Amino acid sequence: MTRKEQNDQFTAWIRDHAGILHKVARAYSFQPAEQEDLLQEIYLAVWHSIPGYKAGSKVSSYLYRIALNRAISWVRRESAYRRKLDQFQSAPGASAPDSRLEFLYAEIRQLTKTERALILMQLDGFSYEEIGLILGLSTSNVGARLTRIRQKLATNLKEKTP
Amino acid sequence: MTLKEIQIAWNEQAVPPVDQSTIFRQVTKARHSMIGGILVLAAMLLTGTLTFWQQVERALADNAYTFANSYLDMAVTLAGVLMVLRGLVYVLRMQRELRNFKDDTWSCLELLIHGLRDDVRSIRRHLPIMLGGLLLLGLLSRLQLILGGVGFNDGWAELILVGIGVLMVYAFFRYRLQVHVRPRLEALEAVRRELAGDSLKPDDL
């Protein structure tokens, strides 16, 4: 693959699938600046992974895999951010988020890294088999975990929805 | 908020505007800086290796250039070459990791953890051996000078300087180990344990 072909492929993927990368970066970062940093890292990983793409396979699945792997291995002082977020959420009057979506993302960020990966792909309509292939888990394992995560998320959202 | 409402909210989210030229510029800049780093390290490695080779040739050819008065040049150059080589390996590994993000999460974590464990091993075992060897060579050379009739007080200053340098290098790497490498390794191992869940026995980890 020539450099030009790689650049063209990169531009096309970003144009068509930017939403996937943004969703992952948003779910795995606790502050806007951190989200930007993570997005840049994801873009770089995507660019480097273009030659490894096998024609015919699903681009969205390939990009999800790269973005999630980059985000999961993105180690910042997350515990500190998480504490800040907890303080923010427990503060009086702070339970009114900007929108339902922001509220949903805040709840997703409370999940563990693996749980976040599972629920993101589930929300985006990936099958258990596809999720299993991306994460390296068995299909039955994915199903069992997702059932627990959905229950957990629904309970949390029911309790906290303003 | 019910599960159905969650799904609706998720599907309705808008994609933020994407400035492709900025993204492309950022990626190109990151790539160029990585390539630049590799080239600088490769140039340093070449220079260091050539210098070391010249020093070895001189020590073999020039009788006046004994172990005692050549140790510092040779050992410091060799230590420098080894450190640059390590740096080069580190940058190349970063590139390989970038390409491996296309693999499944489990394999990807395995590779990252393997690399970080390699870093820990290098700092905890290989670096002290290398730096200790450097100091030992220094002490031996002083001993050779003293046995050769040079005054006991001569030449200790440069050995002390090398000792301080060694301590500073070691302190830097220990700091890096405690602040960056270990926390990252522990975080990634925690994710791997979480990913393994009940699908693997602890022995498999």
Image (cartoon, coloured by chain):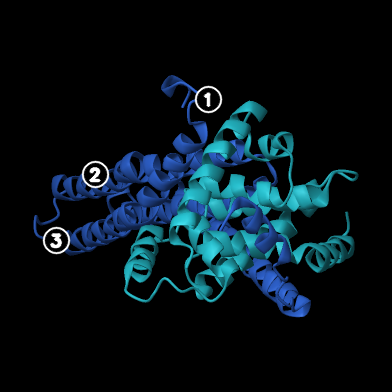
- Labels in figure, total: 3
Do the residues at discs 2 and 3 belong to one chain? Answer: yes
Determine which of the numbered discs, if any, sits on residue B199 in the image: 1
> What tint does the image give chain A?
cyan
Residue A119 image position (x, y, % from top left): 60, 48
**Residue nearer the viewer, B117 or B17:** B17
Q: Amino acid at mark 3?
A: Asp
Residue B12 placement, left or right of A71: right
**For the residues bearing labels 2 and 3, Cβ distance under 8 angstroms:** no
Q: Which residue is mark 3?
A: B154
Give the CA separation, mark 2 to mark 3. 17 Å
Q: Residue at x 33, y 67 (%)?
A: A90
Element carrying mark 1 = loop
Q: Amino acid at mark 1?
A: Ser
Name the residue carrying label 2.
B136
Are the residues under badges 3 and 1 in a single subunit? yes
Query: Is disc 2 in the same subunit as disc 1?
Result: yes
Instruction: Name the chain letter of the residue that bears numbered label 3.
Output: B
Q: Residue at x 50, y 56 (%)?
A: A157
Residue placed at 33% from the left, 57% from the top?
B179
Per the model, the C-alpha gap separating discs 2 and 1 is 50 Å
Tell me the distance, in whole angstroms, between the alpha carbons under discs 3 and 1. Answer: 66 Å
Q: Earlier in the sequence, mark 2 or mark 3?
A: 2
Q: Report the mark closest to the observer, 2 or 1.
A: 1
